Image: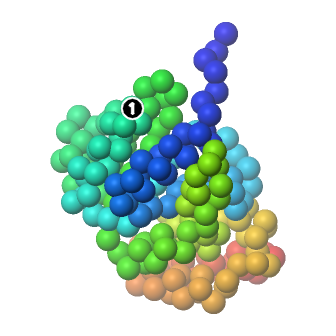
Amino acid sequence: MGSPQPDLPSFLAALTLELQQRGLHFMLIGGQAVLLHGRPRFTEDVDVTLAAGPAALPLVRAACEALDLSPLAEDPDAFARRTFVLPVRQTASRIRVDFIFSTTDYEAQAVARATRVLLAGAQVPFATAEDLLIHKLFAGRPRDIEDAEGIVRRRGAQLDWTYLERWAAEFALVPGREGMPVALERLKAGL
């Protein structure tokens, strides 16, 4: 007999409250946000984009301790300062969380725009469909492109295409991301 499924809504609510108590602004991205905006797929991993740099690590570590989230890296502070990611796992549920530190203007405004969803008594911030789409195009892996297609199929008519085109053009200036505007146009053409 397998272990019981974790109560993900309650976990996300507790995570939200812990981060908010510490004054940390954030949004959920990745698979959890895809469940909200795109095609459903199984995932228990949680990706959290923080509107803060690694200087906020003590606050994040305190939240992790309160939630029984253990670091996965051997030297978690050095790893987070080097990669801007703190990977952790909850002991009981085995839920993995990646805290992604960000100091860009784009991420700060994306966090401010986040869609709040009531889960287990907490207003949990998820990336908007547009910002999730930008994240998926930026990552560009096959799974991300599938997710982007699912978002457009589900939300295409409601998407703010002007906003998407603006950020795709901005990110096209980043080496290796020059194709984002073309990828966005392909998605738009598929509506």
Q: In this view, does 146 lie to the left or right of 88?
A: right
Q: Which residue sits at x=43%, y=72%?
A: 107
Residue 177 percent coordinates (x, y): 45, 75
Q: Mark 1 points at which residue?
A: 68
Viewer can see residue 140 = no
State whether residue 46 is above or below residue 107.
above
Q: Which residue sits at x=70%, y=46%?
A: 41
Quarter assignment of residue 73: top left
Viewer can see residue 94 = yes
Say which quadrant the N terminus sits in: top right
Say which quadrant the C terminus sits in: bottom right
Q: In this view, does 133 lie to the left or right of 14?
A: right
Q: In this view, does 70 lie to the left or right of 43?
A: left
Assign a secondary structure to mark 1: loop
Say which amino acid is labelled 1. Answer: Asp
Q: Which residue sits at x=60%, y=82%?
A: 164
- Colour theme: rainbow
Residue 35 percent coordinates (x, y): 68, 53
Label 1: few (<14), some (14–19) or many (≥20) C-alpha neighbours in 10 Å: some
